[in-house]
Every structure is written in C-alpha cells, then in structure tokens.
Image (spheres, rainbow, N blue to C red):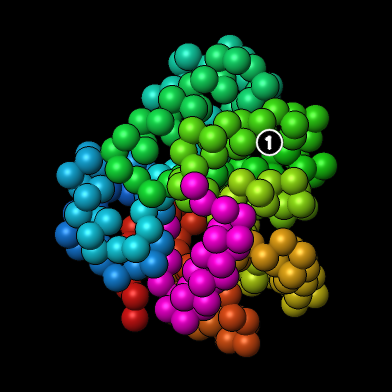
Amino acid sequence: MITGAILFQTAQALAQQLTKEKQILFTYGDFYPKDVSGYEIVVLESAHFDSKDIQVLKQQNNTVLGYISLGEVNESAAHYPEIKDFSLGKNNIWNSHILDIENKETSKSLMDIIKFNMKKGLDGMFLDNIDNYTKFGPTPEKKPALLDFLKTVKILFPEIYLMQNAGVSIIEDTHPYINSVAKESVVTDYDFGKNKYQLREEETYLRLLHELEEAYRNYKVPVILIEYAETKKLKKAIDQRLEENNWPYFIGKIDLQSIPDKN
C-alpha cells in the first residue's frame, strides 16, 4: 500500500526530474511507438494503440498516460452515443458536449474507459476539462461528484498516475487524488476566432504563473505547462519567457496531432 508520505516523496522526485529533463510529450495523433523515446511523460490518445504498442512505449519512456475528458465528450468519441442524452449543453469551440458526471450512466461510461486503458497497460490518465467544475466552468455544482469519481478511481487503481488539466482553483479539493497538474496557454493565447498563435499580455501570464506557484506551494503538486506555437520565432519567445521558470513545459500545435522536434 502506498502511504501519503511515499506519494509526497514521489511527487517531489518527479517534479525535480521533470525540471531537469523538460521532456514531456502531448500528442493525440497516431504514430509508430518505436519512434517515441526518452520522454519522462507521454500523453496520447490510446485508441490508436494496442497493448503491445503500450508495452513498447513504456520500455522507451518513463510514464505513459491515456487521454480522457471528465468534463466534455466530442461527437466523434466512441462513448458519445451512450451518454449523449445525459449531456448538459455544448461547447461550440470544440464541438463537444458538457458531461454530467453525477449521472450514473455517464460515470460508468467514463470509469469503463479508465478500466480499459489500465488493462492495456498504461500508467494512468490525463484528465481533461477539470476546469468545468470550477466557478469559472459550466458545472461547478458537480464538483462533489467529480471528487467521488476520482476517489473511486484511486481505490480501484491505487498506483494509477492522474494528471489533472486546468482547474487550478480546485486543487485544494483534487490534490489528494492527482499526481500532477497541467495548465494550457499560460504564456501563449491562441485566438480561435482568427486561428492565430500569439503571446499573452505580460501582466496576464505573470498572474497565471503566480496562481500556479501558489498552488504548488500549498499542495506540492508538480506543475506542467502546455503552450501552443507553430513558428520558431514564437517558440523562442516562449522559451525566453519561461527561461527563469523551473517547471517543465511542452510546445506544440493547437490540435496536438503531431510530434514536435525535441531539439
């Protein structure tokens, strides 16, 4: 059984390793597993890979996580037909539907996805759209149901690695169940209306960094940044802004379908 002290030490060790290596990969596209190696964490769309593929990836990388959204479901997702009637609205930017995790059918569908991924041999899951359960999201009243879901996941899979995406303002509630938190677009600000990659205003990104620093200081959850760029010039600007920050960060295109060059 893993104690709280061991989990804390593990989180601290991982934070230090990530800071040193800064090798994180987020990609939801298909790729040859043999071509991906040397990453501390790989986050992928597991539907593209079978158990043998996952085994190869785990041999060549430290931690391999599958993607799941606990806040929304896209119409192209395999589990959409079974839970679409229980959704609570629509996110038009991503053409996705807002989940009611308190609904038994929805909760079971999500848990089945996690069980299937763990059976494949993955180390854990990347939990997207957690910000839906904050006061800034569409379903803050469903936060207790989210916490119950996370607690159940940890009971079923005590050693599972869970990376929370966004929802920094509720880390005080989720931190007992997660191993790290990812935050998108801290120094960049992709304009969906204009399909434009750009930097944030300095005041805004400094405020976002401060919020993450406070969360890490209070709950000791390792932080990972996800930034978006398509030109070398913008990537260089991101590197410069994060030069004095010790957190690992990933830079990719907004659709996360390709694998960027490490160099």
Who is closer to the viewer here, 128 or 92?
128
Q: Residue at x 49, y 47 (%)?
A: 1
Which residue position holds label 1? 147
Q: What's the magenta bit mostly, secondary-structure-wise?
A: helix
Whether residue 45 is situated above or below residue 263 in the rendered picture: above
Which residue is located at x 22 percent, y 40 percent? 51
Using the image, determine if residue 73 lies above or below residue 175. above
Determine crowd level at label 1: few under 14, some 14-19, many 20+ residues with C-alpha closer than 10 A. some
- Secondary structure at badge 1 equals helix
Quick check: can you spot residue 125? yes
Residue 91 position, x and y percent, is 63, 34
The image quadrant that residue 56 belongs to is bottom left
Image position, residue 120 (x, y; %): 29, 38
**Residue 216 picture quarter:** bottom right
Quadrant housing residue 154? top right
Tag 1: amino acid: Leu
Name the one closer to the observer, 64 or 160: 160
Residue 94 is situated, as x and y percent measured from the top left of the image, at 55, 39
In the rendered view, does 23 fall on the left or right side of 74? left
Drawn side of residue 158 relative to residue 63, left or right: right
Q: Nearer the viewer, residue 87 or 167?
A: 167
Q: Residue at 64% x, 17% y: name it.
A: 103
Residue 138 appearing in the image: no
Q: Residue at x 57, y 22 (%)?
A: 107
Left or right relative to 51: residue 132: right
Q: Is residue 11 magenta?
A: yes
Q: Is residue 81 above or below residue 220?
A: above
Is residue 243 a member of the stretch shown in magenta? Answer: no
32 vs 117: above or below: below
User: Picture coordinates of residue 226 (x, y %)?
Assistant: 54, 63
* Image quadrant where one finds the C terminus: bottom left
Q: Which residues are magenta?
A: 1-28
